[in-house]
Image: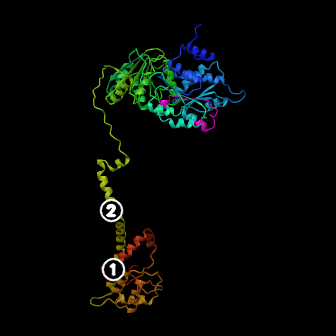
Amino acid sequence: MEESLFEKMNLIKPLLSAVEQCGYHEPTPIQRETIPPVLQGRDVLGCAQTGTGKTAAFALPILQLLAKSQPKQGSKRPIRALVLTPTRELALQIYENFVAYAKKLPLTSCVIFGGVGQQPQVDALKRGVDILVATPGRLNDLIGQGYISLKQLDIFVLDEADRMLDMGFIHDVKRVIAQLPAQRQTLLFSATMPTEVEKLALSILTDPVSVKVDPVSSTVDAIRQFLYLVDKANKKHLLADLLSKPNIESALVFTRTKHGADRVVRELSRVGIASKAIHGDKSQNARQEALSQFKKGKIRVLIATDIAARGIDIAGLSHVFNYDLPNEPEAYVHRIGRTGRAGQKGIAISFCCIDEQKQLNDIEKLIGKKLTRLESAWPMQVFTETVKQPRQGRKAQSEQPPKSAKQNTAKAKDAPAKEKEQPAVQKLKVSASDEKKVERKADKRKEKVASTSTEGKPDCKPKQARENKQQKPAQEKPPLTQPKMETAVADASPKTTAKPAEKTIRMKATPLERPVSVSSIATEKSPSAREEKKEKKVSEQTELSYQQYIANLRRQRGPLATGDDRR
């Protein structure tokens, strides 16, 4: 019996049996070039197109190496092989392949990823694991919690290396690498490998064997590629029209953003086409349910983003739609590689609006040929690119108030001046109320004086009252230093002697420390109960303004009869 090509690569019998059960008759180019150096313990940098068998290229030799070096009996199984992947779907697919290949081997595998509870994964790790397939986030979490130790690791695999490093996982990857032993075998595999990512990947490897079976720009010849030039607003109508045709058995539609994927699902639902979306914002259960329904044929349209579609392996996928052209031309090759697998034919249809003309030129330059143009009922009618307005910062927006706010702005400018004037207005209001009280008291005093005086005779009653007041002992009150009020008192009592006047002049420099008479300084009688309630509501500033107001009032009306007129 003629020896098969897998047997020529020196694979052990359990693996040959598993390969035969999976329907592999001969190895793919990436498998022929990769399996021998991995079995020799060399580091490998493998670049192969999606659907060419990368998973088997590293899974088969890893299983054989681990089967030959079993750990000691009775001890807990240490993690000896780690496969790091960017997405949960790809992690599940790789794990399923390891389980299928290792059916007849005494090796255990485990998969961990985020979006689900960690307890079942922790329980599996406690039982012992030989091969661990993981996403970076959950792996670092469990390492931090002490559930995972990579000190005895022998083989490290970084799958989809371009996306892992290019999409912001570089820091997570470095954290994982920091936990690995220095002596290890490292394998990197990817569907595409731009030059800058390749340089970064080579810095992680040690004397690697570079395997590039298919160029980065190559596409499978079995895939027929077509292009529709259509305006952005009409893409939804064209997609619904094409999906309504019966020859499309299953379709995978790629969008650039997560919101765009959800929007396409809603637009198709309005015309009666059932579809599901998978992207990073969906929960793991929702993504798995959508993918399961698509594989079982319950729905025939699946909407996905580039990251979420990594690792999707759907047998018999007939059509791939590029609803939005990718920003990177290499991603186009990866997208259409979902169809046309295992020797089957596939069709890739792309939509292009005027804003995506640059991406189209880059794609055609990369693959080295023009896409076949097709006509539709919605031809392109907009030939002017959309000019994106630069977003203004918060500072610039605050400096330019809206037109409707001009009056408010003018009012805001006058607000400080009005606020300064407001205390003065309050003073006047308080002074006016007190002025009425003083006027009423002055009128009553005048009526009493007029009733006791006669025409042509001097008013003696006030003098007698003053003399009687001078004989009474003065009340003890705190000294007051008010020059204006003192001047008014001096004018009101012209017959006072010079000594009290000298005392009045000295009071300006030093306050009196002993009681003074009513004639030498103006005093205030203690307020009544009603006035006390009012004075409690008046601030200190109001009291000062009241005293100033009395002094001004006396200057305007002349000297009052006595200093006791404020009663």
Q: Tell me the CA gap for discs 1 and 2.
A: 32 Å
Q: Residue 124 vs residue 476: left or right?
A: right
Residue 436 in the image: above or below residue 200: below
Residue 89 in the image: above or below residue 544: above
Residue farthest to the front, as pictured: 207
Question: In the rendered view, how is the structure colored?
Answer: rainbow
Q: Residues within 10 Å of mark 1 (few under 14, many from 20)?
A: some
- Magenta stretch in the rendered image: 140-163
Name the image quarter holding residue 110.
top right
Residue 377 in the image: above or below residue 284: above
At a point 29% along the width and 91% down the height, the residue shown is 457
Q: Is residue 330 in the magenta section?
A: no
Q: Which residue is mark 2?
A: 417
Q: Residues within 10 Å of mark 2 (few under 14, many from 20)?
A: few
- Disc 2 is placed on an element classified as helix
Tell me the mark number nearer the camera, choosing from 1 and 2: 2
* Amino acid residing under circle 2: Ala
Residue 432: tell me if it is visible: yes
Q: Which residue is mark 1?
A: 554
At a point 30% along the width and 79% down the height, the residue shown is 556
Residue 98, percent across and down?
59, 22
Residue 537 in the image: above or below residue 366: below
Residue 103, percent across and down?
62, 19
Residue 304, percent across and down?
45, 26
Residue 135, percent across and down?
54, 31
Q: Quadrant of the C terminus?
A: bottom left
